[in-house]
Image (cartoon, rainbow, N blue to C red):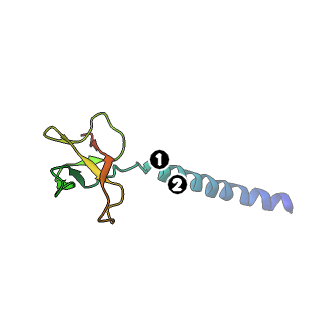
Amino acid sequence: MKSNNLKRFSAPLAVVILGGAGAFFTASMGSVKAVEERPVYRYISQQDPCHQEEVRCQTELADEICSYGSAQLFGKVNEESPNNNCTLPMYKVPN
């Protein structure tokens, strides 16, 4: 009797296990890390040390630094803090 139950449930159990494993691996392969674009700033003067620019930049290390003309652009470590200096190096988003 035991061998009949084992034979009867082994094929459906194998299908469930393989299906779950396939779904897990498909989902994990599809998740690609998105580039985190953040606001960027450049130093203009003492009165405007963090002037925001409309340039696409990222925090993740890339080949080129992010710049506006000849000025290097930086990000804020904490965007919510009004007293935060713009010291975070930013890099160009690859095309």
Residue 69 locus on image (x, y percent): 13, 40
Q: Which quadrant would the N terminus be assigned to in this image?
A: bottom right
Q: Farthest residue in the left direction?
A: 69
Left or right relative to 9: residue 47: left
Q: For the residue marked with disc 2, what is the amino acid?
A: Ala
Give the mark nearest the N terminus, 1 or 2.
Answer: 2
Q: Residue at x 25, y 55 (%)?
A: 39
Q: For the residue marked with disc 1, what is the amino acid?
A: Met
- Residue 76 sits in which quadrant? bottom left
Residue 53, numbered label: none
Q: Residue at x 74, y 60 (%)?
A: 8
Left or right relative to 9: residue 95: left
Residue 63 locus on image (x, y percent): 30, 33
Q: Farthest residue in the front direction?
A: 46
Neighbours of disc 2 within 10 Å: few (<14), some (14-19), many (20+):
few
The residue tagged with tag 2: helix, strand or loop?
Answer: helix
Q: Nearer the viewer, residue 93 or 10?
A: 93
Question: Is 81 placed above or below 22 here?
Answer: below
Q: Is residue 37 visible?
A: no
Disc 2 target residue:
23
Q: Are marks 1 and 2 in contact (CB under 8 Å)?
A: no
Q: Nearer the viewer, residue 77 or 20?
A: 77
Disc 1 target residue:
29
Q: Nearer the viewer, residue 90 or 29?
A: 90
